Amino acid sequence: MVNLDALIRGAVASLLFSVIGILVFVAGFFVVRKLLPFDVHKELEVDQNTAVGLVVASFILGLAFIVGMSIHG
């Protein structure tokens, strides 16, 4: 039979790590927006600059990897 206490602890830990990961991602994205010398929204939406899209995508993947590895241990 499944241990309900362990299942609840695992679900709470998963939810907690998810929230922490999202908060770290949002904070990191605001830092990147401040560090870049141009308006990211304008470059992506108005000018459709593919190079900026690749920079933002690489940031997202890199930060996701870092957060995932820090949660995994």
Image (spheres, grey):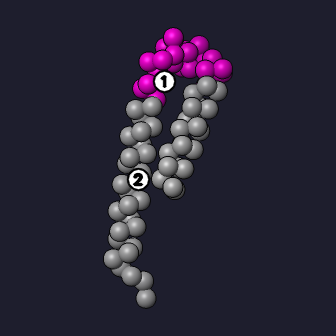
Toward the front, the furthest residue is: 73
Disc 2 residue crowd, few under 14, some 14–19, many 20+, Cα 10 Å: some
The magenta stretch is 29-53
Q: Is residue 50 magenta?
A: yes
The tag earlier along the polypeptide, 2 or 1, is 2
Residue at x 35% of width, y 68% of height: 9
Q: Measured along the vertical axis of the image, is residue 5 above or below residue 1?
A: above
Is residue 42 in view? no
Say which quarter of the image contains residue 53: top right
Is residue 69 in view? yes
Residue at x 38% of width, y 65% of height: 11
Q: Evaluate if marks 2 and 1 touch, with contact meaning CB atoms under 8 Å apart.
A: no
Q: Is mark 2 on a helix, strand or loop?
A: helix
Disc 1 residue crowd, few under 14, some 14–19, many 20+, Cα 10 Å: some
Say which quarter of the image contains residue 10: bottom left
Residue at x 37% of width, y 48% of height: 19
Instruction: Report which residue position mark 1 lands on.
Output: 32
Toward the top, the furthest residue is: 37
Residue at x 33% of width, y 77% of height: 5
Say which quarter of the image contains residue 64: top right
Q: Distance between the residues labelled 2 and 1?
A: 22 Å
Toward the bottom, the furthest residue is: 1
Q: Tell me the chief SS of the magenta region.
A: helix
- The quadrant the N terminus occupies is bottom left
User: Where does the image place residue 7, in percent across and percent down from the top left?
Assistant: 39, 73
Mark number for residue 17? 2
